[in-house]
Amino acid sequence: MDFPKTLSPIVEAVKKNKKVCFFLGAGVSTSCGIPDFRSPKTGLYANLKKLNLPYPEAVFDIDYFREKPDAFYTLAHELYPGNFLPSKFHFLLKLFQDKRLLKRVYTQNIDTLERLAGVEDDYIVEAHGSFANNHCIDCHEEMSSEELKKHVFNREVNNGIPTCSKCKGFVKPDIVFFGENLPARFFSQWDEDCEDVDIAIVAGSSLTVYPFAGLPSEVGKNSIRLLVNREAVGDFKSRKRKNDILALEDCDYVAETLADLLGWKLDLDKLIKA
Ligand code: OAD
């Protein structure tokens, strides 16, 4: 069957005003120039030799950060939001919002590109936090983003590592590190949403990090689930449901195709060019 046809159950449901809940990972931002984590050659974890980590995920581990914050700050210098523009996929989210057909966007990404594309705060659940706020890891004193940025981009002073004005502890953006809790809103919003997901679109994630990776398996058996990813992953691989749709394609290509099938191509082009 040709690929666009596989999307018709989604198109039909959207045309009946069913809303879409998105579950996003790093793959929706690779076309923006931000590497994902686990792609074998290009992913972040395959390219961290210079940081001399005991294992790749240590760069986002809270215990390792307490010992050696410089690894994270070397990376923060490269990944700090501000240098990247949203992808077609991000603009598709905004289009669903504009058409009042967006239920929610659960994202693991810390790049804030959903917001930059124009998706409003209420719709976004940043499951792994973001660079928007920063706190001391010891006394929890806040540091403004302007102040933190000054440190990140001036690596000659203290290796770019910001310390607390009160207790001298290390300051870190409120990104959820391994060993830390997810934001309370992740759990409360999901409690509210999970019973009522008509269409679930999972895009650009290897579905390896829990609890986020478990969300698609919690949507009702009658929901239509679509995976947009280079390969089959998680629940879509191990416990595929009868009405699941697998689009093993590039995220932006699927965004473009879906917009076209919904008659939204011009709207999407307009958003991208604005
Ligand atoms: P991963 O790097 O684990 O997975 C990204 C997935 O997207 C892979 O399956 C890729 O094949 C796929 N992919 C990449 N580019 C794509 C494209 N243009 N089109 C389609 N598919 C594409 O990233 P995440 O699942 O987001 O957590 O990783 C989850 C968490 O692991 C991150 O939030 C981060 C990390 O450790 C923390 O730091 C707490």
Image: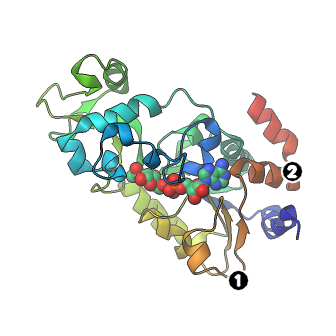
Q: Which of these two is toward me, 120 or 92?
A: 92
Above or below, comparing residue 87 to residue 163 in the picture: below
User: What residue is shown with label 2?
Assistant: 260
Q: Residues within 10 Å of mark 2 (few under 14, many from 20)?
A: some
User: What residue is shown with label 1?
Assistant: 242
Above or below, comparing residue 91 to residue 19 in the picture: above
Which quarter of the figure is the C terminus placed in? top right
Q: Is mark 2 within 8 Å of ligand 1?
A: no
Q: Is residue 172 rendered to the left or right of residue 253? A: left
Q: Quadrant of residue 270?
A: top right
Q: What secondary structure is marked by label 2?
A: helix
At which x and y percent is residue 145?
A: 36, 27
Residue 273 in view = yes
At which x and y percent is residue 261?
A: 87, 56
Above or below, comparing residue 17 to residue 219 in the picture: above
Q: Is residue 133 rendered to the left or right of residue 65? A: right
At which x and y percent is residue 256?
A: 80, 48
Above or below, comparing residue 86 to residue 205 in the picture: above
The residue shown at (86%, 51%) is: 260
Q: Which of these two is toward me, 153 or 18?
A: 153
- The residue positioned farthest toward the left in the image shown: 167
Q: Quadrant of residue 222?
A: bottom right
Marks 1 and 2 sit apart, C-alpha to C-alpha, by 26 Å
The residue shown at (31%, 20%) is: 155
Q: Which of these two is toward me, 150 or 74?
A: 74
Q: Amino acid at mark 2?
A: Asp
The residue shown at (30%, 42%) is: 52
Q: What secondary structure is marked by label 1?
A: loop
